[in-house]
Every structure is written in C-alpha cells, then in structure tokens.
Image: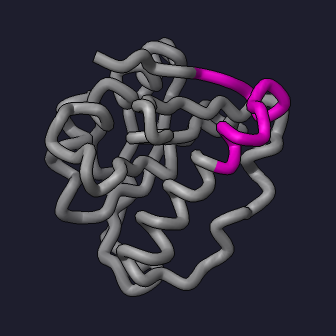
Amino acid sequence: MSSVWVAAFTDLDASTLYGLLRLRVDVFVVEQRCSYRELDGRDTEPSTQHLWTADSTGPTAYLRVLAEPSGWRIGRVCTRRNARGAGLAGRLMDAAVHLTGDAPVVLDAQSPLAGWYERFGFTVCGAPFLEDGIPHVPMARPGG
C-alpha cells in the first residue's frame, strides 16, 4: 500500500511537482476535455497542502486543500486512469478530512460523485451547476 504524501508547494521538488501537475492535466484537461486555467495560482499559496499517492511510475492520485476565509476547500481530486478502483482517492480524502480537523470544509463535486463524498461527511449545500460542461454540486462538511 502506497503512502499518502503531504507537502506545501515550497516543499515539492521539481520532479514531484511536474508529476502532480501532469496527473491533473491528464485527468481534467485531456481525459475530461475541459479547457480551463488548470494552473490557477492557488497551488503556490503558503497554506495550500498537496496530498498524493505514488508508485514507481509517478503520482497515482492527488488532491489539494486550500485555505478559505471560513475554513478549507478540497479540490482537484483525481486518480490516474490505471490506478482507479484501488481506493487511493478515498485514502486521500480520509487524510484531507484528518488534516482539516474540526474546521468547516467545502468542495464542488462532479454530480455523479456526490454520494461518494457523502462517505466523508459532506452534504449537498446548494443548487447544481455546470462547470466546463460537467454537472457539479456544492458540498460542505460543517465544522465542530
């Protein structure tokens, strides 16, 4: 079982950063055919935490945790195509929930995955919306 790695942007070496960004682009831009600003400037914020798993060929799953005015935001949750079904994204979500503690956390889930995020204590908290042509729902896990 691969380890869950956690690092701030400044602690990522160039090779790891390249692998993480390539995974995100492979999943969101290429596979899901979404043309959007993948590099949005939030990766470099001092409070951002990057979480991932890897094998001998590179990152297998990834997500990031961003500081928000009212708590935290989880985003960019993705798994390499040939690593899906092994529970890696779930391990990262468990780690992210642990990392954020009792603070409120929000995320925007692709609609078909809302039930999956409910396993981690998230509930739909707003109206569905389209992002890059993909149906999403806002979800939240209250603090406490």
Q: Residue at x 64, y 67 (%)?
A: 38
The image's colour scheme reads one colour
Q: Residue at x 52, y 16 (%)?
A: 99
Q: Quadrant of the C terminus?
A: top left
5 w.r.t. 130: above or below: above
Determine if the magenta segment contains residue 16.
Answer: yes
Q: Position of residue 58 (x, y in %)?
A: 49, 40
Segment colored magenta: 6-18
Say whether residue 115 is left or right of residue 123. left
133 w.r.t. 102: above or below: below
Q: Quadrant of the N terminus?
A: top left
Determine if the magenta segment contains residue 40.
Answer: no
Q: Magenta region's main secondary structure? A: helix
Q: Position of residue 89 (x, y in %)?
A: 32, 37
Q: Position of residue 14 (x, y in %)?
A: 78, 41
Decide which of 56, 114 is in the foreground and name it.
Answer: 56
State the image quarter where residue 95 is shown: top left
